[in-house]
Image: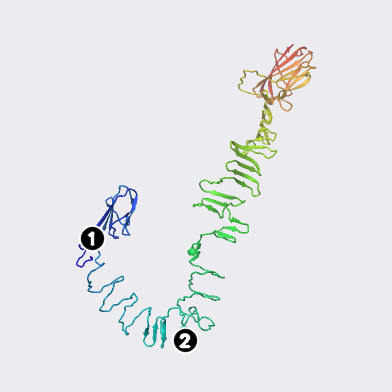
Amino acid sequence: MSQQNGYIGRSPGDSAVIIASQTFEPTGVQTNFTFASGYTVGYLDVYFNGSRLIFANDYTATDGSTVGLTTHANNGDVIECVAYKAFNVGNVEEATGNFTVGNQLTVTGFTTGSSAFYSGIVTATSFSGDGSSLTGLANTDVINTENINVIGVATVGSAVTINSTGIDAVSGVITAANFVGGGANLTALSGSNIASGTVAAARVATLNQNTTGTSAGLTGTPDITIRNVTGVAATFTGVLTYEDVTNVDSVGIVTARSGVEFGAAGVGGTITGSGNAIISGFSTFNNDVTFTGSTKNIVFDQSDQQLEVNGDNSNVAKIAFGDAHDFQIYKGASGGNVFMHNASGTLNITQNSGTIKIDKNTGDEMAHFIVDGAVELFHNSVKKLSTRSDGAEIHAAEGGEAILYFTADEGDEATDKYRIAAQDSGDLIIQRHSGSGYSSELRVKSAGGVQANYQGSQKLLTITEGVKVTGVTSTTSLSVGPGVLQEKLYNVASALTGTVNFDVVDNGLVQYYTTNSSGTFVVNLRGDGSTTFNSLMDIGKTTVFTLYSASNNASYYMTDFQIDGSSQTEKWNGGSAPTAGTGSGTDVYTFNIMKTADATFTVFANFSNFA
């Protein structure tokens, strides 16, 4: 209804705007738009690039001015808002003339006016105001009210006079369902004046008489509101509710079914009724603390000041990290084993400076990881290996050898094992395991030179002049020069007589005896006192042995040629062996030796004289 009588809908004096619309063209991402004309909630349409949006799904409009899009608009989009002015014939905001209602007028809220005139009876559930202008009440009228505020003097019949200070005189009996108030001025109350009924002890703050015995006679179910309760003991079978308690001293069990809060409104901590505890500050425990598992526990033992995780590999309490608990620390089934298990990813141990040490608890060193430096490994607290900027280094104790071992094929056979050792003497050796021990196969001498051995025996040695070979040198092809191919000459000032051992390992295959032979002699060719000549030659190989012997007596000559003590049947140049010496100059014996089988030789011999 309009503000003017006689019109249904809008009067000609109302605003001409029936539908209000506003267009928005954002220059960037925008979600909220302010509708300048305002709208009535529920009477607004919103269009996005010409498409009508659905309220709540596509946009919100709840405060009369702001429209919020669920999906933001962007540069180039067009938002149009259209508002409809709602009309409610039941709403009357203002009338300049009289307003007549043919039947009852029902007002849901408050009715406000400077004055109201009623010719009949006004009935209401309550009247608000101070009642200062409420006049004309007859003494036969009944007023039912919860409180009467008396400014002046009110006389109730002839028995009671009430003024601003209270009830001045009572000549009769005052009967009421309840008396409300502190009762501070209710005096001279004797127990004998309480004619009937029961007064609960908790409801009587102070009695103007001595009270003895028990309070068994205090019964009923009224609420009791008091300031302080002082007593030796109190038992409450129902629910006890209290606030702002300074201290609670209980010698028995305190049950808090809904939980317990610490600090102001639980800021310090909360223990819920289901047993969850949330503590905002520090928690201090002055005794052992046990975290109970289904079968094993984690205990902080105050006596030895350590966190103890109980259990073994099959029934174990674990310390786990990560949302998926994929990193775990726990003790193994036996032998004191402890496991750090990372189910996936990389296990990182980081340190910014200093050294990460893994040592025995007695102080014996095991492994040190120096930040920006070496990694050091120890055996029984003796450093054995360390990394360097240019490689790695093997160490030994004072007076010991620095040894690096190589084990092939899992080391299940002794001959799978090799080692390189830097000796206290300064030599570096490469050794192989023969089955009974390590023997040196290659030695780098501290004084210079390299020695190569066969089964521990020297076969090659570098010297100042070149290379010294002990034994037989075998090659498929030998190219020499430019230069001189030299062979060792054994030059000795001795006379040949009897059986003479010619040791080729020590003296070579060319030997010159510069003193005239003093009798007939036998030549025995061998390696040395412990090495056979047979062991030095391979089957299918040949060599030449040459013997020079000074002679001044034809009766003194070689009567037999032996190899490793066995006489050989030589094939002599000219068809027969010599039967005498030349008796002058130097007799020369040359033996071309072919090995055709083990310890089997074919020897081609030649005898000549140089004078």
Q: Which mark is residue 193?
A: 2
Asked if residue 475 is positioned above or below residue 573 in the image, the reply reads below
The residue tagged 1 is 15
CA distance separating discs 2 and 1: 76 Å
Kindly give the residue lying farthest to the right in the view shown.
Answer: 518
Q: Residue at x 20, y 65 (%)?
A: 8
Indicate which disc, 2 or 1, sits on the residue closer to the N terminus: 1
Q: Is residue 594 left or right of residue 245?
A: right
Quarter-of-image position of residue 289: bottom right
Quadrant of the rendered image containing residue 46? bottom left
Q: Residues within 10 Å of mark 2 (few under 14, many from 20)?
A: few
Residue 262: x percent and y percent? 51, 64
Q: Nearer the viewer, residue 607 or 609?
A: 609
The relative height of residue 579 versus residue 68 in the rendered view (above or below) is above
Label 2 residue SS: helix
Q: Is residue 407 visible?
A: no
Number of numbered labels in the structure image: 2
| Between 392 and 296, the one nearer to me in the picture | 392
Dividing the picture into quadrants, the one containing residue 393 is top right
Check the picture and name the quadrant holding the C terminus: top right
| Amino acid type at mark 1 | Ser
Query: Left or right: 488 with respect to 300?
Result: right
* Lateral position of residue 45 relative to residue 385, left or right: left
Residue 517: percent from left, percent from top: 78, 16
Which one is in front, 483 or 293?
483
Residue drawn 64% across the image and 45% down it:
365
Q: Is residue 66 visible?
A: yes
Q: For the residue marked with disc 2, what is the amino acid?
A: Asn
Could you tell me residue 220's position as x and y percent? 46, 79
Against 84, is 363 above or below? above
In the picture, which quadrant includes the N terminus? bottom left
- Disc 1 is placed on an element classified as loop
